[in-house]
């Protein structure tokens, strides 16, 4: 494949994304769709065959299942304030390993974010659905200078769990040594993000997590809003694709992301609530 072919594909994706965005009212301004991840493979000599994308979704998936990467992620969680759900997953993992040893396979949003952070060394991260800062802390611990933008309604008692708010999240990120910029916006992602993207037309991200509104319509809106902001080579993580309370999310993922050839994708839905990741190839 030549550089010229890559550019043509990119231009086609650019105009298609701009048209779709206009139709969906996400942003009236064009999105800078040719930005690469900050850790892109940079070969000194032309031609540039693969567009700088060094690792795809399969690589992130393999890393997410790697016991060393998992251990690192869970050690980060141990540094945070005690949480009922984290304690449950810790005991669940121990029981699984006890029964099946090295053959046991498990991944979740935490291990996938740990894997993506290890691969990409993100300089910019967007998270929709922050709650206590558990998932955000994984990225912050692995990329301490990363600029982080988080959006959450901080709905009290979300899913019968406590949801203490942005001050708590700030403290958690300090615990894991994060020194980069941190912007936490309280509000509905469907209103906040279009406004932020209009105000900051050049804003793009190396890594994005969509884990907020779990309704079919809401999750689809979030995915559509953020996908044009994902850099080439960047990763998008989508949580809970096999959560029994949200059976429509897997279909949302398939239609919005898997069906689009620009993305390589990997899913884990064997056990637990399931998680998916996509890497933008062009
Ligand atoms: C599953 S929790 C996020 C968990 C977190 N990512 C983690 O791994 O620990 C979902 C969060 O999304 C928030 N949320 C739900 N609907 C939202 C919306 N429309 N806009 C912004 N946040 C929303 C809830 O307040 C809740 O804190």
Image (cartoon, rainbow, N blue to C red):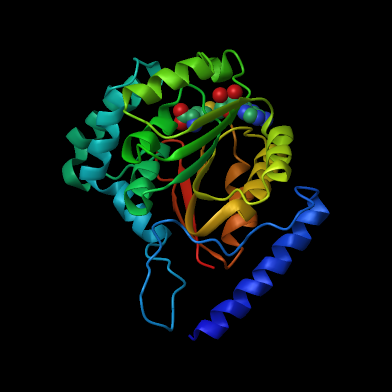
Marker count (numbered): 0
Q: Is residue 45 left or right of residue 208?
A: left
Which residue is depicted at the point 39% across and 25% down? 173
| Residue 69, picture quadrant | top left
Which residue is depicted at the point 61% across and 27% down? 185
Which residue is depicted at the point 36% across and 74% down? 43
- Closest to the observer, 44 or 87: 44
Instruction: Write down which quadrant ligand 1 falls in.
Output: top right
Which residue is depicted at the point 42% across and 39% down? 109
Q: Is residue 161 left or right of residue 175?
A: right
Residue 244 in view in this figure: no
Residue 167 in view in this figure: yes
Position in image of residue 187 (x %, y %): 67, 25
| Residue 186, picture quadrant | top right
| Residue 212, picture quadrant | top right
**Quadrant housing the C terminus:** bottom right
Q: Please, is residue 234 above or below residue 273 in the view?
A: below
Position in image of residue 254 (x %, y %): 59, 55
Position in image of residue 129 (x %, y %): 56, 31
Position in image of residue 203 (x %, y %): 60, 48
């Amino acid at each position: 494949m030549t550089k010229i072919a890559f550019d043509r594909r990119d231009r086609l994706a650019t105009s298609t994304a701009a048209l779709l965005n206009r139709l969906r009212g996400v942003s009236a301004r064009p999105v800078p769709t040719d930005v690469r991840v900050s850790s892109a493979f940079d070969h000194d000599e032309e031609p540039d065959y693969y567009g700088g994308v060094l690792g795809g979704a399969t690589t992130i998936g393999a890393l997410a299942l790697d016991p060393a990467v998992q251990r690192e992620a869970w050690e980060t969680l141990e540094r945070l304030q005690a949480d009922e759900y984290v304690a449950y997953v810790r005991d669940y993992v121990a029981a699984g390993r006890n029964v099946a040893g090295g053959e046991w396979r498990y991944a979740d949003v935490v291990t996938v974010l740990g894997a993506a952070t290890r691969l990409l060394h993100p300089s910019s991260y967007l998270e929709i659905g922050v709650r206590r800062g558990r998932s955000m802390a994984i990225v912050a611990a692995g990329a301490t200078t990363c600029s982080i933008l988080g959006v959450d309604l901080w709905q009290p008692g979300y899913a019968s769990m406590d949801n203490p708010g942005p001050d708590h999240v700030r403290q958690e990120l300090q615990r894991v040594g994060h020194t980069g910029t941190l912007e936490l916006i309280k509000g509905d992602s469907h209103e906040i993000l279009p406004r932020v993207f209009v105000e900051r037309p050049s804003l793009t991200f190396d890594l994005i997590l969509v884990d907020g509104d779990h309704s079919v319509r809401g999750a689809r809106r979030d995915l559509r809003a953020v996908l044009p902001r994902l850099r080439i080579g960047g990763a998008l993580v989508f949580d809970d694709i096999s959560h029994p309370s949200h059976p429509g999310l897997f279909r949302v993922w398939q239609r919005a992301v898997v069906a689009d050839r620009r993305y390589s994708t990997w899913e884990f839905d064997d056990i637990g609530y399931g998680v998916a990741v996509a890497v933008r190839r062009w």
